[in-house]
Amino acid sequence: MAEASREQWRSHGGFLLAALGSAVGLGNVWRFSYVAGEHGGGAFLLVYLLVVLLVGVPLLLGEFALGRRMQSESATAVARLLPSSRWRHAGLIGVIAAGLILAYYAVIAGWVLRYAALYLTGQSQPLATAGFAQSFASHVAHPSQPLLWQLLGLALTALIIARGVERGIERASIALMPLLALLLLGLAAHSATLPGFGQGLRFLLQPDWTALSQPRVYLAALGQAFFSIGLAMGVMVTFGSYQPAHRPLPGAALTIALGDTLFALTAGLVIFPAVFSFGRDPAQGPGLAFVVLPELFAQMPAGALLGAAFFLLLSIAALTSMVSLLEVVVAYALQRWGWSRPQAAWRLAGLLFALGVPASLGMGPWGEVSLWGGRGILDAMDFIAVDLLLPANGILLAVLLGWVWPRHEALQAADLHGRPLGAIWHGCLRYLVPVLVLAVLAGSGTRH
Ligand code: TRP
């Protein structure tokens, strides 16, 4: 690693947008909407907002601070904090989580790519004719078609990583992300005119207090926060390492976490009014956005065009997230096995494709397979990575940042030295995050 000449963000805005670009992906549209729909809407959102503020922001700031202070990516940064300990292998949890997530993320990205292709080639009409739910169901259940789209997504990702052009792709996507935000805002404005707007709004914003007595709501919110912000995989450590010393980090962490949340919230404001206007079930699971959005486009003026723009932009958002995720696994392989970059990219993408095949088949031919409390294959992979591995790694990260890193160094690195907020931040990492995350994991474990 050429540390003396480490590349730095040219502007604060560049840093914010790049980190936000990594955070914004399918998690904000696809995952947020279906998980919120499954867990009671408003109750979920309330817990989610609390988790983002109390767990997400402190950990995000911690990752940034660690990366900038150590001027290195995650594994090296962690190793420097733990000069002679076996604990440094704990970073492997994040690598495994990233690989597992990418394996099924590619399946969902494949669905997005396929919808983008349909709209771009003017073939969205049959979705309406055959029925939106039916079209989606028959696409994902097809034994080979979704595999091709999944393969295409992973191949593009591997190509970008193999060529080492991810910074370039990132810069390009930065320009497109505000477009996606604008489009979502426009769609939300349209959703506000739908007959089911009031009902959708109440569902998303008005907590059903009885839902809060279910432990799984807390675990779902916690996992979603880690996933959506992109925490506990070391990615944000790397972002922090490019950030020049004179730019304060706390505001950046808050802006990124809130920006990511606003993205998800806006997607929710698009989707839930539509769900109720069309008489759909908000708790229908991972297909929610893919069933409801095409129906929304079908009854909008210029809907085919908007649908094309939307799925194209979402494809790009998904691709940039996939690039970041593959980079985590590739970086590990480069360091560990000394493969060349292209070798690592193609081999690992191949491996992760193979790992994702059962997830895709589980939506159709292998639909009967039920793992771990009645979960389908994709659902089970998602559960292990997002609801177990990421929170577990979050605890390790909080302990590392809050206990192993000397307090004054951590505070200085986070630009919070001698500030009242510093005590709160450090207290969160030291006590609140480990205890809260452990309690949520344990609480949901006892009742499954
Ligand atoms: N945050 C991304 C999304 O919402 C997914 C993701 C999780 C991710 N962890 C990541 C992306 C790490 C990049 C890096 O879709």
Image (cartoon, rainbow, N blue to C red):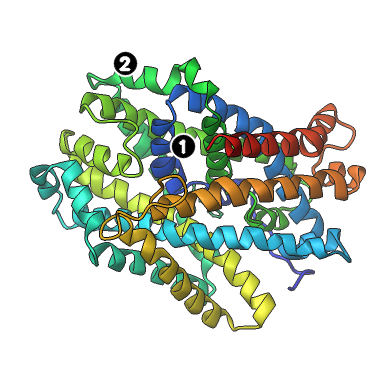
Residue occupying the far left of the picture: 129
| Res. 296 in view | yes
Q: Is mark 1 within 8 Å of ligand 1?
A: no
Q: Amino acid at mark 2?
A: Gly
* Quarter location, residue 39: top left
Q: Which mark is residue 263?
A: 1
**Residue 397 as seen in the image, left or right of residue 12:** right
Query: Looking at the image, do the residues carrying marks 2 and 1 touch, with CB atoms under 8 Å apart?
Result: no
Q: Quick check: can you spot residue 73?
A: no
Q: Quadrant of residue 62?
A: top right
For marks 2 and 1 on the same chain, the one whose residue lies earlier in the sequence: 2
Q: Please, what is the three-letter code of the amino acid marked with disc 1? A: Phe
Picture coordinates of residue 355, whole percent (x, y): 44, 67
Q: Which residue is mark 2?
A: 198
Say above or below: 239 vs 286.
below
> x, y (%) of residue 121?
17, 58
What's the residue at 26%, 24% (across, down)? 276
As measured in the structure, the alpha-carbon distance from the residue carrying label 2 to the one carrying label 1 is 20 Å
Rendering coords of residue 34 (x, y %): 38, 38
Rendered view: 247 above or below 186: below
Residue at x 77%, y 39% (from the top left corner): 429
- Disc 2 C-beta below 8 A from ligand 1: no
Residue 262 image offset from top left, x and y in percent: 49, 33
